C-alpha cells in the first residue's frame, strides 16, 4: 500500500510539473506573471547580450508579436503589460490602450459584435498608404494562452484619412493585443496621376518605383504589354515584380496582381505583360519589389 501511495504521488507530481511547464506568454522568468524583469530580459536578448535558443519555450514566450525574432517591439509590449498601462476593458475584452500609434498609423477605437471586431484607423504617416498595409494582433484567453495571431488589411488612405476595418476573434478570447503595423506606401498617390493610354486610364508614364521605370503601356485585347528600364544602378533578378490594380468605372477593384520582369543589368530595358479583367477602365501601377 505504501509503495502504491508513493507511486501515485509521483504520478501526480509528474503531471503537475508538465502542467507548470506551460509558460505564460511573456513570463520569461516563470514567476507566474509578466513583470518589468521579463521586459528587461527580452531587451537583453534583442540586443544580443543574452543568448536564447530559437527552439526554446523562452524564445516562443518572448516573441510576443510572433515574427520569429526577439526585438525591441517585443520588449516594449512586455513593458506595457508589466506596467499595467497596455489594456482597457472595451466591450468586455481587455484591449491594447487606445488610441495607440504604430509607425504613424493610429488605432482609434475597437468595437465587438459577436466574434467580429471593428476598428477605426487613421493615417497619420504624412503620406498616402496602400491597402496592403496591415495591422497585426494577438488574441489571448484568461490563462494568457495565444488563441490566434493574425493581421487585418487597411484601405487605401491619403494622409489624415480614416477607415474602418474588421477581423474575427476566437471563442474564449478575453484579451486582444495590437502588436505592429506593416506599412505599404504608394498606390493611392498614383490614382490621381493618370493619363488616357490606348483608351485606358493608366498611371501617368513614365513612372519610377525604387529605380525601376515603367516607360510605356500598350493594350491588345485583354493583354497589357509594358516596357521597363532598370535605373537602379545594379543588376536585378527575374524575381523583381511590378504590382498593379485594375478598376472598373465605379472604382471597384477587379484585380490586384503583379508581373515579373526579366534579369536586367543596370540601364537595360525589357518588355513584360499581364492580362486585365473584362470591364477594366483603369490600371494603376502601385509598387515594385526589387530582387537584386
Image (cartoon, helix red, strand yellow):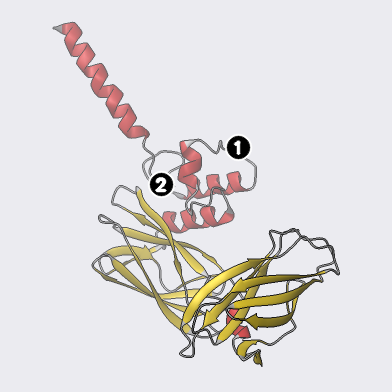
In terms of image quadrants, where is residue 21? top left
Quadrant in the picture for the N terminus = top left
Residue at figure coordinates x 53%, y 70% from the top left: 132
Q: Is residue 166 left or right of residue 131?
A: left
Question: From the viewer's perspective, is residue 249 above or below residue 254?
Answer: below
Q: Is residue 270 left or right of residue 259?
A: right
**2 or 1: tag closer to the N-terminus:** 2
Residue 70: percent from left, percent from top: 56, 48
Residue 73: percent from left, percent from top: 54, 57
Question: Label 1, on which residue?
Answer: 51
Q: Are marks 2 and 1 in contact (CB under 8 Å)?
A: no
In terms of image quadrants, where is residue 120? bottom left
Question: Label 2, on which residue?
Answer: 25
Circle 1: element type: loop
Q: Nearer the viewer, residue 164 or 75?
A: 164
Residue 6: percent from left, percent from top: 22, 12
Residue at figure coordinates x 30%, y 23% from the top left: 14
For label 1, the crowd category at 10 Å Cα-Cα, with few meaning under 14, some 14 to 19 and many 20 or more, is few
C-alpha distance separating marks 2 and 1 = 19 Å
Residue at figure coordinates x 46%, y 41% from the top left: 28
Quadrant in the picture for the C terminus = bottom right
Question: From the viewer's perspective, is residue 84 above or below residue 32?
Answer: below
Q: Nearer the viewer, residue 278 or 37?
A: 278
Circle 2: element type: loop
As drawn, the label of residue 75 is none
Q: Nearer the viewer, residue 258 or 187?
A: 258
Residue 165: percent from left, percent from top: 40, 74
Q: Is residue 199 left or right of residue 148?
A: right
Amino acid at each position: 500500500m505504501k509503495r502504491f501511495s508513493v507511486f501515485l504521488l509521483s504520478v501526480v507530481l509528474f503531471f503537475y510539473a508538465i502542467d507548470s511547464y506551460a509558460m505564460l506568454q511573456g513570463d520569461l522568468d516563470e514567476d507566474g506573471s509578466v513583470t518589468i524583469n521579463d521586459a528587461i530580459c527580452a531587451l537583453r536578448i534583442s540586443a544580443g547580450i543574452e543568448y536564447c535558443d530559437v527552439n526554446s519555450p523562452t524564445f516562443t514566450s518572448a516573441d510576443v508579436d510572433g515574427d520569429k525574432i526577439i526585438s525591441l517591439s517585443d520588449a516594449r509590449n512586455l513593458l506595457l503589460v508589466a506596467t499595467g498601462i497596455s489594456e482597457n476593458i472595451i466591450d468586455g475584452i481587455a484591449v491594447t490602450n487606445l488610441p495607440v500609434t504604430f509607425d504613424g498609423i493610429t488605432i482609434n477605437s475597437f468595437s465587438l459584435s459577436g466574434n467580429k471586431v471593428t476598428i477605426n484607423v487613421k493615417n497619420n504617416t504624412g503620406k498616402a498608404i496602400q491597402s496592403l498595409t496591415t495591422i497585426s494582433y494577438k488574441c489571448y484567453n484568461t490563462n494568457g494562452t495565444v488563441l490566434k495571431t493574425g493581421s487585418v488589411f487597411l484601405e487605401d488612405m491619403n494622409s489624415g484619412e480614416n477607415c474602418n476595418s474588421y477581423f474575427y476573434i476566437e471563442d474564449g478570447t478575453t484579451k486582444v493585443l495590437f502588436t505592429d503595423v506593416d506599412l505599404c506606401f504608394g498606390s493611392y498617390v498614383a490614382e490621381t496621376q493618370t493619363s488616357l493610354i490606348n483608351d485606358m486610364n493608366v498611371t501617368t508614364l513614365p513612372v519610377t518605383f525604387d529605380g525601376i521605370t515603367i516607360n510605356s503601356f500598350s493594350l491588345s485585347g485583354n493583354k497589357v504589354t509594358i516596357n521597363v528600364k532598370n535605373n537602379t544602378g545594379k543588376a536585378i533578378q527575374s524575381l523583381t515584380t511590378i504590382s498593379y490594380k485594375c478598376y472598373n468605372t465605379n472604382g471597384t477593384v477587379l484585380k490586384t496582381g503583379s508581373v515579373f520582369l526579366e534579369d536586367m543589368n543596370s540601364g537595360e530595358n525589357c518588355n513584360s505583360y499581364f492580362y486585365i479583367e473584362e470591364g477594366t477602365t483603369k490600371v494603376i501601377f502601385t509598387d515594385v519589389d526589387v530582387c537584386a
